[in-house]
Image (tube, helix red, strand yellow):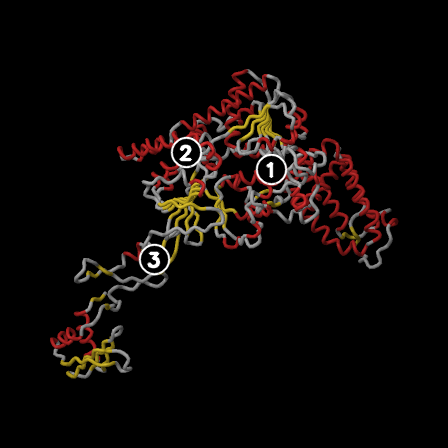
Amino acid sequence: LTVFSPIPTDARQKIEKLLDANNLIQAEPCYKTVNNLHLLDVSFIDIVLISSPMGMLGLPFLTRTKGFSAKIYATEATARHGQLMMDDLVAMHTEFRQFYGPEESALLQWMKWEELEMLPLALRERVLGKVGSELGGWMPLYSSALCSSILLAKCNLLLNGTAEDHGLKIILGTYGFLRFSIPMFPEATLCSAPFIYTLSVIAITYTSSTTLRQIFLKKIIAYSPVAHMNLLGTSMTTPVPQREEVLGEYLTSFRPMAKLNKACSIGPLCCAERVWNSLEGAGMDLALVHASVAIAAKITEEGVSAADVKSCMQRVQVLKYAEEACYNGSITIKAFSSGLEIGSCNWTISSPKANIGHVSSSIFQSETAMDFNYHALQGCDAILYSDNSARNILGNVEDENCHFASVNSDLSIKSDTDNSWEVIGEALLNADERSEEMEKLAFIISCAVDSVEAGGSVLVPIGRLGIVLQLLEQLSLSLKSSNLKVPIYVISTIAEELMAFTNIIPEWLCKLRQEKLYSGEPLFAHVVLTREKRLHTFPAVHSLELLKIWQEPCIVFCPHWSLRLGPVVHLLRRWCRDQNSLLVMEEGVDAELALLPFKPMAMKALQCSFLSGIKLQKVQPLLKILQPDFVVFPEYLRRHIGPPNSSSSFLGYSENQTLRIPNRKELPELYISMDLATQLSWTKLDHKDTSIARLKGELVMEHGKHLLHPGNEQAISSDTRPLLHWGAMDLENLLAALQKMGIKGSVEQGMSDAGSEIASVLHIFEPSKALIEVKATTTVISTSDESLASLISEAVNTILNSI
């Protein structure tokens, strides 16, 4: 997003020079996704696993792709937090779009090659990539279904005095229907009447239901008049009995309707004036009412049918930690906490062939979210390691090589001598990381307090919820100890919902927060700050309530971390020349490029790096505890993962590469139900220490396991089952067994009747005739004497194994 301009500037200079604000792209922003996503065949994707709320932002780009039908899994907290972030992004983008206006051309103007060639080299590499192949990854933002946050922002504008123009248009439109449309086009009005009042009834029901759940007066004022206006539309087009005394003077002012049924007319026209009079008598601001209707119509027109956010959320199946989800009966999926954010997780994927564990960005000990549950990944055949935070810290690894090596060598020595996994576990859970993070937060708070004491304000556009909650907690303590009464504002379209969301999810929080719940204390400090009226939440910078209580210096938390969207743009323009003010940014954003539109800047900027994943020196000890057969990791980590003395096989993967992982399980496992196992009748073999039994059941796949059930057929007793023989029949032994029974015969060697293979034949001639023919794969016994057949069967049982 930093390649786009958040504010209007002068025309760009079409020459190559030092990068300045005039070189930024003056257009509605697009968003960088997977390269050539539109060329991928997404129909081959079966499952999508989302590990963090930030990952939810890219989901609509995937779900709206043609042919996408995969199953999507995310934790309940991730799905809710991610949906709020998407709604907020849509609201901020809509504000941006209202400023620039929608792009009319299917091909965005800035994407034309002649425009791209004019970009400075730094911007061109960000847009096209180093090899010029990443232009296809830019996509327009998804839309939102009747976004209430957009409506609320409009309402704020209306309350500030811009409603008269909209209200006048609505009044004139209604008057035009009453005065011109109905008298001049009676037949067309009659034909369209059912369509009009059907839509009006739907709108009345929808807006009234939405109004019931609102708690803010602005939203109530915005939604409820829509129902009133649709009620008026319904009254104008609903057929009612025609009575002279009701219509009064209106009948004399309209032309007779030639083909209209005399028993009805189009609406009680005299009621229109009564509706207006009743609204005016109740003190309702008609301009505001009509403007709200115009806004609702405008939002509906802008694409309610293309509700990408709502559509993708309907596809998501939410899970709790350790809850099983079975896909197609063959794969079992579980989510376990990763410690990064509230609701973020790692995954285990179990199937009859292999068990796979996926490790995303994780933190062993967290101040807000539940700690990293790495024990749940033990026993996996393969570990897919995809902690993207490692790419950001690789630049610092070279300076820490000695520390990196010493930590791993100490761990390996301890584990070899003590032979204890607890030693490695304690090393992974050491408190150094937590104390380091607390020192960073304390430094930020000290800088913020210094700025406030100097008369400046503090702006914090950080997107990670856990960091924001910790900063609020530290701020409350520091301001209280310094005896500073400085207001704290959280400005976002989802601010109030997000703060309320953190108070109803104790099962996703760390043990410290859960203990606070059990003791009756607030989970987070923002609850106390709000109760003491030191923390205020507002949906937009132009909120009327915010303007009433606004005071400086202050501390503001708001989106967006790119400094291109949302309230941060307005506040930066206000404070960028104040040398006492402070901007707190999170690492990962190019600060030089992000601050370009606001230069020259006197405002102090503090860019901080927070722990966002597993440190590289802890990866090898973690893998030593997990002990997988295979470790699959990004190729750029090859020098930092995979010690030579490890028992695991390490496989690196790159983009656009298919990696095949061997399967070390030679035979799959079969689970037999208890009901079927009790029916088994075992027979011990003669020359082997083995027992054998026959069974019949129904083979099914459940929760990633092969299961054998009795089936729907009635169980057959083992006494009534016919014997099943196996093995090769020796005719000499069979003849000896028959002679003991008084049966005489002779053995001959010859060809089969078909003459295609060699067969051994036993001719029985006393007491009656019978023929036994033994081939390589079959044995045929022929006789017309039933008693002789019974004796032969008994003889066969004595020389062959049977069950």
> What amino acid is labelled 2 in the image?
Phe
Q: Where residue 511 sits: x, y (%)?
A: 42, 31
Q: Indicate the quadrant where residue 682 lies.
A: bottom left
Q: Mark 1–mark 3 contact, CB under 8 Å?
A: no
Q: Can residue 651 be seen in this view?
A: yes
Q: In the depicted view, which residue is nearer to us: 719 or 546?
A: 546
For label 1, count other residues whose C-alpha is less than 10 Å away and answer few (under 14), some (14-19) or many (20+): few
Label 3 residue SS: strand
Query: How many numbered marks appear?
Result: 3
Q: In the depicted view, which residue is nearer to us: 167 or 403?
A: 403
- Residue receiving disc 1: 122
- Residue receiving disc 3: 708
- Residue receiving disc 2: 364
> What amino acid is labelled 3 in the image?
Leu
Question: How far apart are the alpha carbons under marks 3 and 2?
Answer: 41 Å
Question: How far apart are the alpha carbons under marks 2 and 1?
Answer: 37 Å
> What amino acid is labelled 1 in the image?
Ala
Circle 2 or circle 1, nearest the eye = 1
In the displayed structure, 454 sits above or below 322; it is above
Residue at the spot 63% in from the left edge and 25% down from the top edge: 601
